[in-house]
Amino acid sequence: MAIEPEAPQAVVNDFMAMIVEMNPVLDRMTYVFCSIDPAQLTSDIVLSSLALFHEEEGLSLILPSAKARLLKLPSGGAPMSRITLTVFSALEGVGLTAAVATALAEHGIACNMVAAYHHDHVFVPADQAQEAMVILGALQAAAAEENAR
């Protein structure tokens, strides 16, 4: 019996709807940000990377912490946790990442936002991930309450 593909998720670009529907999900894995010279790039690094970005100074990578250690790649800081905002936000949607970053900054939590095709991803210090989830849940609840008025 063939498995039917899921219907595509509707793209959301209204600011309030993006916040109300963001439904953050915490990934159990920790990640590190690394930078390497393009000449060091191997297929193992590419296949292990969650993200790869070409910058003037070299290739920036986001890798699972354990894999970066195994590959002996230098990381640029403490382990990070990834929180995925599961709303399918429009690439041209305005305000979601700013609202999330502001809410976390107001509580002293650093974040690195990565916008991918389907979802936005929030990288926060691993030791503050649970607190970040509470803050994002409160942001979503406040938006839902305001939207219901």
Image (tube, grey):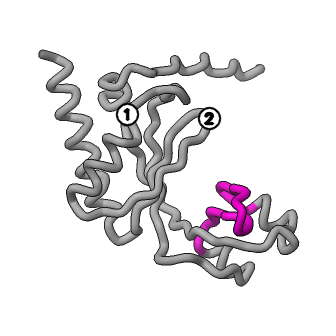
**How many angstroms separate mark 1 from mark 2 (CA)?**
16 Å
Magenta stretch: includes residue 123: no
Give coordinates of residue 147: x percent, y percent: 20, 20
Q: Quadrant of residue 48?
A: bottom right
Q: Nearer the viewer, residue 39 or 22?
A: 39
Location of the N terminus by quadrant is: top right
Residue 38 to residue 99: above or below: below
Image position of 39 (left or right of 9): right
Residue 13 to residue 109: above or below: above
Q: Nearer the viewer, residue 56 or 2?
A: 56
Residue drawn at 37 percent across, 33 percent down: 95
Which residue is at the far front?
A: 56
Residue under numbered circle 2: 117
Give coordinates of residue 75: x percent, y percent: 60, 77
Image position of 114 (left or right of 101): right
Q: Amino acid at mark 2?
A: Tyr
Which residue is at the far left?
A: 149
Residue drawn at 52 percent across, 63 percent down: 29
Residue drawn at 69 percent across, 18 percent down: 4
Count of numbered labels shown in the rendering:
2
N-terminal of the pair, mark 1 or mark 2, is 1
Residue 99 to residue 33: above or below: above
Determine whether the residue tagged by mark 2 lies in a helix, strand or loop. Answer: loop
Query: Crowding at label 2, few (<14), some or many (≥20) Cα neighbours within 10 Å?
Result: few
Nearer the viewer's eye, disc 1 or disc 2? 1
Q: Amino acid at mark 1?
A: Gly
Residue under numbered circle 1: 95
Give coordinates of residue 83: x percent, y percent: 44, 51
Q: Which residues are magenta?
A: 48-65
Q: For residue 128, which numbered disc appears in the image?
A: none
Determine whether the residue tagged by mark 1 lies in a helix, strand or loop. Answer: loop
Query: Crowding at label 1, few (<14), some or many (≥20) Cα neighbours within 10 Å?
Result: some
